[in-house]
Image (cartoon, coloured by chain):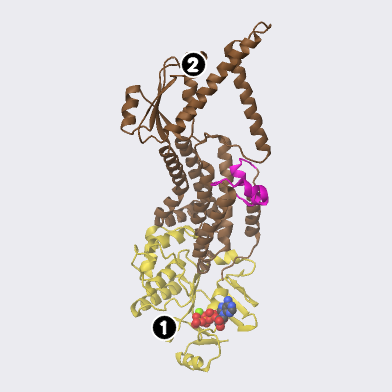
Amino acid sequence: MLSVESLSKSYGKKEIFKDISFSVQPGNIIGLVGENGAGKSTLLSILATLQSPEKGSIALFELDYKSKKREVRKHIAFVPQDIALWEDLTVEENMMFFEKLSWKKKGKEELKQLCSNVKLDRWNERVKTLSGGMKRKLNLAVSLIHDPELLLLDEPTAGIDLKSRKEIGNYLKKLALENGKMIIYTSHDMDEITNLCDQIICIGEDPFYQEILTETGKNILSF
Amino acid sequence: MIDILKTRLIHWKKQWMSLLFWLAFPTIGTILIIYTTTAIQQDSQVPVGIVLEENTPLASELYHTIQQTPLIRVVDVTEAEAKRKVETHELDSAFIIQEGYEEKIQKGNRNWLIKSYTSDLSFAYTPVKEMIISLVQEDTGRTKTAHIVRQISEGSSKQWSIEEIIVKAKEIQQEENLLRSTFSFADGEQSRSENEVTIWNTWGLWAVLSALSTLLIFDWVIKERKPILFSRYAFMRFSVKSYFLQNLLIYTIILFIIDLTTAYLFHVFLNEELTLNWAVLLFIHRLTMNTTAFLIGLLFRQILVYYSVSFVIALFIAIISGAVLPNDGLTSRFTWLEILNPLHSFLNEEWMNPWIIVCVVLIAIWKTRGVESHA
Ligand SMILES: Nc1ncnc2c1ncn2[C@@H]1O[C@H](COP(=O)(O)OP(=O)(O)OP(=O)(O)O)[C@@H](O)[C@H]1O
Ligand SMILES: [Mg+2]
C-alpha cells in the first residue's frame, strides 16, 4: 500500500500544494483532478520518485521513498504526460528496447499481449507514423512491462477515441480488481473518473470542481 | 551488458547505413586520399624513356639518379621502342646510355656518351639533358681529378688506384652534405628528403577524419539524453549513468575493432607498420577519442549545435595537429598548442597521454556526482 503524509511542494516562492495526505490500498483506483497548472503532474512525478517534495514523507509497501528509492522504483509504473518513446523505432522495437532494460524478462508474445491489452495492434509500425492516441497507448504499454504494483498515469486517455478509452478503462479496472494493482491517474474527463475511480483527489479548491465532484457521489479529498 | 548491447543493436539496425558510413569513413577516406594524391603525383611526372646499353657501375648509377628525380618517371625501353614512343608522344623524350659509357668516362672522353630522342613536344628534354650532362660532368670530372691526383702522387710511397680516389671523393662529398644538412637542421629548418613522394601522413590524416567520425557517431549521447526519456530511465534495471557508461564501453570495443582492422588495411594497402606497440597506442588513442567525444556530448542538448561544433573541432584539430599540413612554425611559436592537441601523443607515438587522464578523471567525477537530472 501507498501512504502519503503531509506532502508540500513549491517551485521557488510559488507554492504548488500543501499538506497532502492520503493512502491507497491494493485494488484502489484514485482519480486526480484539478484545473490546468493545479499541480497534478507535479504530484504524480513526486509519487514516481522523479522529484522530491519540500516536506512530508511517502512510503510504498513500508519502503521509504528517501532511503529506498531504488527499491521503490521497481514497483512503480509512471506514464508521463508527454510521449517518452523512440520515434524512429517501431512499436515492437520500442517494447523490446525497454524490455531489455527492465527488471522483468518478457518474451515477444507477452509484449504483444500487453499491447493488445491496451488496444494497440500496430506492432510493426514506426512510432513516428502512429496517431497521437496510438502513441499514448504505447506510452502506457511500455510503462507496464515490469509488472509494477503502483501505476501512476498522467492523462493516459487524453486524445484516445471513445471506444479505446472504454477498453483501456476496463483493462485498468481489471488490473486493479483482479491483480490488486494500485492506480492513480489524472484526467479531465469527469465521466471517466466517475466511472473508474473509488476515490477522487482534487487539487486546488476551485468551487467549480467542488460542485461537480459532489455530484459524483464519490469519496472526495480536496487540498 | 549483453542487454545493453541488444538495445544498442535495435538502434543500429535503424541507422546501419549512416553508422556503417561513419565507421568506414576515416579508413576508406584515408586510403582514397592517399591513393589519389599519389596517382595525381605520378600522373604529373614526365615519362622519360631510358635505354641502358651497358651494366657497368657508372652507367647504372646514372640510371638510378635519373630514376630518383622527383618529376621524372623512368620507363625502361629498347632503342626502337624509345624512338617509336617519342614519336607518338607516349614518352616525352628518351636517352640512351650507350655501350662503352664507363670506359669513355674513365678515358676522359666526354663525347658520344649519351644519345637522345626528342620530339617537338618534348618539354622535359632540356632539363633532363641538363641534369644528365651535369651528372656526366661530375663523373668525368671525378675521373679526371683522380687521374691528376695519381699523376701528382706518382713516385710517392702511397699509391692510390683511380677507383679508390673516386670512392674517397664521394665520401668527402657526402660528409659535406651531411654537415650542411646538420647545420640547416640546427637553424630550425626541416630538411626534407627530396624523394619523399607522399605529402600526406597516413595516420595523421586518419586521426583527423576519425576524430570527426567519432564525434558524429557519439551523437547518441545527445539523442538519448532527451529530458522526457529520463522518466523511462528512472525505472530501468540500470542507473542512468551506468547505462551511458556501458554504452560508452560498447562503442569503445566496436570502434577499437574497427581501428585494428584499419591498421591491417593500412598495412596491406599503404605499407604501414603493424606492431603490437602500435596496437596499444591505437587503443590509448581510441579511449582518448571516445571519452572526449562522450564528455563533449554531455555538454550539449541540441543535436544540430553538436554537429556543427563537431565539424569545428575536427577542423581545429586538423590545423593544430599539423597532421594534414605541416605546421612546425605554428607549434614552435605556441608550444601550448601541442599540449592542447589530443592527437599529439598518438602521432608522436608517446604512451603518456595527458588527455586521457583528464577525460577519465572528468568521467569519474560525472559518475560519482550523485544527482541525476531528469527535469
Ligand atoms: N520545473 C518547474 N519550475 C517551476 N515551475 C513549475 C515547474 N514545473 C511546473 N511548474 C509549475 O507548477 C504548476 C503545476 O504544474 P503541473 O504540471 O503539475 O500542473 P497540472 O495540474 O499537471 O496541469 P495540466 O492539467 O495542464 O497538466 C504550474 O503552475 C507550473 O507552471
Ligand atoms: Mg499535467
Mark 2 is surrounded, within 10 Å at the Cα level, by few (under 14), some (14 to 19) or many (20 or more) other residues, namely: some
Which chain has been coloured yellow in this picture? Answer: A
Q: Mark 2 belongs to which subunit?
A: B
Q: Position of residue A213 (x, y in %)?
A: 48, 90
Left/right of residue B328 with respect to residue B257 in the rendered view: right
Residue A70 visible in the current orientation: yes
Residue B239 visible in the current orientation: no
Left/right of residue A107 with respect to residue B340 in the rendered view: left
State the hue of chain B.
brown
What residue did someone put label 2 on?
B109
In the drawing, what numbered circle is on residue A192? Answer: 1
Hey, what amino acid is under mark 2? Asn
Q: Is residue B326 magenta?
A: yes
Residue A218 vertical placement versus B76 (above, below):
below
Q: Position of residue A77 (x, y in %)?
A: 50, 69
SS for callout 2: loop
Residue B27 vertical placement versus B174 (above, below):
below
Mark 1 is surrounded, within 10 Å at the Cα level, by few (under 14), some (14 to 19) or many (20 or more) other residues, namely: some
